[in-house]
């Protein structure tokens, strides 16, 4: 009898201890999942600061506003960050706390943005000027080889296009201008700061598309949307305006990897 009286309290204490441990573990797990979710969720900067991320085929602007009585927010873009800012659109809901804007037609070269904020009382202010940078969540480190694009090329080409394609045996991506896994065109010229490089782009039939008159930095990303369609394109890199550094081709796939 004495032994049984000791055994039952021992069982009760053990069960309470087990429940308590389970409860603590549950709290820890919930905290861990909540913390992980908070890390993954992106919080935009607060005006007058904002972010400009190079996505696939577009540039996305994000911001949080603490201002009230806002009449409109204009999005302005420039290639040099100092002059020639042009208004390209307006925020659809300028009074919202969290807002975003998509530039579906970014320009060749660096794209700088600023926001023009007009209040209901007639006063206005400008945000900071922000350079659009590559989105770190998109994998853009893989240079596309012909093995990656051959199926896409086959799906786009007809007899006329097939005649304009480069030799599949000898073609390889350039070390200076090439397409990456996000579908965008990357320009890598490590000594661009010391030398004056310009780049011209052409359709596969030789028709001129556009030119970047001065590549100022060692790395530059061109959105695939600039080229307006998928397929083969030619390019020429010039040093000091006259010396041809490279003349080659690249392919922009209709569908791209993420």
Image (tube, rainbow, N blue to C red):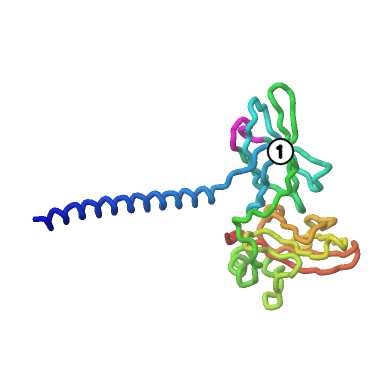
- The x, y position of residue 61, in whole percent, is 66, 44
Quickly name the residue at label 1: 75
- Classify 10 Å Cα crowding around label 1: few (below 14), some (14-19), many (20 and above): many
- The x, y position of residue 73, in whole percent, is 68, 33
Q: Which region of the structure is painted magenta?
A: 91-98
Tally of numbered discs: 1
- The x, y position of residue 258, in whole percent, is 57, 59
The N terminus, quarter of image: bottom left
In the rendered image, residue 18 lying in the magenta stretch gets the answer no
Q: Nearer the viewer, residue 163 or 257?
A: 257
Quarter of image, res 162: bottom right
- The x, y position of residue 225, in whole percent, is 68, 52
Q: Is residue 159 left or right of residue 31?
A: right
Q: Nearer the viewer, residue 116 or 232?
A: 116
Q: Main secondary structure of the magenta part?
A: loop
Query: What residue occupies the far left of the structure in this picture?
Result: 1
Quarter of image, res 209: bottom right
- At 54% from the left edge and 50% from the top edge, which residue is drawn? 39
Q: Nearer the viewer, residue 179 or 13?
A: 13
In the rendered image, residue 96 lying in the magenta stretch gets the answer yes
Query: What residue occupies the far front of the structure in this picture?
Result: 2
Q: Is residue 2 left or right of residue 195?
A: left
Quarter of image, res 155: bottom right
Compared with residue 218, is residue 75 higher up or lower down, i.e. above or below?
A: above
Secondary structure beneath label 1? strand
- At 67% from the left edge and 75% from the top edge, which residue is drawn? 168
């Amino acid at each position: 009898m004495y032994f049984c009286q000791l055994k039952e309290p021992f069982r009760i204490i053990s069960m309470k201890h087990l429940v308590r441990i389970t409860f603590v573990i549950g709290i820890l797990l919930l905290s861990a999942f909540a913390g992980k979710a908070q890390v993954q969720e992106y919080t935009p900067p607060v005006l007058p600061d904002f972010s400009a991320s190079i996505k696939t085929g577009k540039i996305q602007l994000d911001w949080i506003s603490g201002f009230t009585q806002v009449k409109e927010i204009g999005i302005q873009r420039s290639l040099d960050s100092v002059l020639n800012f042009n208004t390209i659109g307006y925020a659809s809901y300028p009074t919202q706390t969290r807002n975003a804007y998509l530039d579906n037609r970014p320009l060749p070269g660096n794209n700088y943005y600023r926001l023009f904020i007009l209040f209901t009382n007639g006063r206005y202010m400008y945000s900071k000027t922000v350079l659009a940078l590559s989105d770190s969540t998109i994998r853009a480190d893989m240079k596309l080889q012909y093995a990656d694009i051959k199926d896409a090329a086959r799906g786009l080409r007809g007899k006329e296009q097939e005649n304009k394609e480069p030799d599949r045996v000898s073609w390889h991506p350039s070390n200076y201008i090439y397409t990456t896994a996000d579908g965008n065109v990357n320009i890598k010229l490590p000594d661009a700061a010391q030398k004056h490089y310009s780049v011209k782009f052409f359709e596969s039939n030789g028709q001129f598309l556009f030119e970047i008159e001065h590549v100022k930095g060692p790395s530059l990303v061109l959105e695939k949307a600039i080229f307006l369609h998928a397929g083969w394109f030619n390019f020429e890199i010039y040093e000091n305006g006259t010396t041809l550094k490279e003349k080659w081709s690249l392919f922009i796939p209709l569908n791209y990897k993420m």
